[in-house]
């Protein structure tokens, strides 16, 4: 896609927006209510598939698409979005279930559980911009391989968070490892995404990537309890929830490991090419102010 193509779009793709939202809504309902296996659930699952197929068809044929499929012609852009799907699915499941684990099993209040998760966020706020600038020198492959693996290690460390867990010795170390992995991963993910498209398409690329991240978290939260056998009674039984949580964390870590494997397909560095409009290289390296701005934006998300 060229900058001219992107800049010429002026309309609002109502059909694409409706079909995209409908796909996610039906899929989430089907996953959440899958245990009943009733006709409504089956209809929702089938409707989600149909709406998703219709969305792709509409976007392909529309003269003014919400998500031009041609943007995925960039192999690097596609790889970054696959990594995003895997990473945010794992992270979404982790933060959702860990907050509940702290309350149901470890006996924290809702406020204390939320406060207990803050170290990861603090690390992101303090160090994400520096991570983005470091990634300029290393290229995308190393941070996007190492970061997800470190996050996965932090998830596996939460196996120690049980009934009599100590915050300082059991909870905090896992969250610090998780936060370190997120610092290493998130800013380079954003920078590499922006480097994979023309400058005029940066807004579109960011929107697609943010939609992928949110959709991954939504589907993960709906699907994980089903996959690990976490029924309604588990939320009232510390022992049952703890057992299901122990099965869920390796799955979340596995998703991050898949993302790391995809990152190995990325180039060590993206060769810069002169951008006709701005007269500078488009790719690695990018200017520090741009890195800092998008790194902090992603961290605050």
Image (cartoon, rainbow, N blue to C red):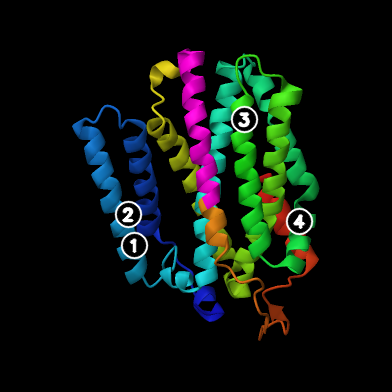
- The tag on residue 52 is 2
- The tag on residue 249 is none
Residue nearest the viewer, comparing 66 with 143: 143
The residue that appears at 77% across and 68% down in the rendered structure is 137
Q: Residue furthest left?
A: 39
Of discs 2 and 3, which sits in the foreground?
Answer: 3
Secondary structure state at the residue bearing disc 3:
helix
Residue 84 horizontal/vertical position (percent): 54, 54
The residue that appears at 67% across and 47% down in the rendered structure is 182
Query: In which quadrant of the rendered image does the C terminus lie?
Result: top right
Q: For residue 108: magenta?
A: no
Q: Are marks 2 and 4 in contact (CB under 8 Å)?
A: no
Whichever of labels 3 and 4 marks the residue nearer the N terminus, that label is 4
Residue 179 falls in image quadrant: top right
Packing grade of label 2 (10 A; few <14, some 14-19, many >=20) is: many
The residue singled out by tag 4 in the image is 131
Q: Are marks 2 and 1 in contact (CB under 8 Å)?
A: yes
> Marks 3/4: CA distance?
25 Å
Whichever of labels 1 and 4 marks the residue nearer the N terminus, that label is 1
Does residue 53 sit above or below 175 in this rendering? below
The residue singled out by tag 3 in the image is 158
What stretch of residues is rendered in magenta?
235-257
């Amino acid at each position: 896609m060229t900058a001219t193509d992107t800049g010429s779009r002026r309309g609002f793709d109502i059909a694409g927006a409706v079909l995209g939202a409908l796909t996610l809504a039906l899929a989430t309902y089907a996953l959440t209510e899958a245990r009943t296996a009733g006709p409504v659930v089956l209809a929702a699952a089938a409707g989600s598939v149909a709406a998703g197929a219709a969305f792709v068809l509409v976007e392909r044929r529309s003269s003014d698409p919400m998500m031009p499929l041609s943007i995925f012609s960039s192999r690097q852009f596609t790889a970054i979005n696959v990594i995003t799907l895997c990473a945010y699915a794992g992270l979404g499941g982790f933060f959702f279930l860990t907050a509940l684990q702290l309350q149901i099993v470890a006996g924290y209040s809702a406020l204390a559980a939320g406060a207990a998760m803050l170290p990861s966020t603090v690390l992101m706020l303090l160090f994400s911009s520096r991570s983005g600038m470091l990634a300029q020198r290393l290229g995308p492959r190393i941070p996007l391989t190492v970061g997800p693996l470190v996050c996965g290690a932090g998830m596996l460390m939460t196996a120690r968070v049980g009934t009599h867990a100590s915050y300082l010795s059991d909870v905090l170390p896992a969250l610090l490892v998780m936060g370190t992995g997120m610092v290493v991963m998130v800013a380079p993910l954003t920078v590499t995404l922006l480097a994979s498209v023309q400058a005029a398409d940066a807004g579109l690329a960011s929107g697609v990537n943010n939609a992928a991240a949110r959709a991954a978290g939504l589907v993960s939260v709906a699907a994980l309890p089903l996959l690990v056998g976490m029924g309604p009674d588990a939320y009232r039984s510390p022992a049952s929830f703890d057992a299901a949580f122990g099965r869920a964390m390796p799955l979340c870590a596995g998703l991050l490991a898949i993302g790391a494997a995809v990152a190995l397909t990325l180039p060590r560095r993206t060769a810069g090419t002169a951008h006709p409009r701005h007269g500078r290289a488009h790719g690695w390296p990018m200017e520090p102010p741009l890195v800092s701005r998008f790194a902090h934006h992603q961290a605050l998300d």
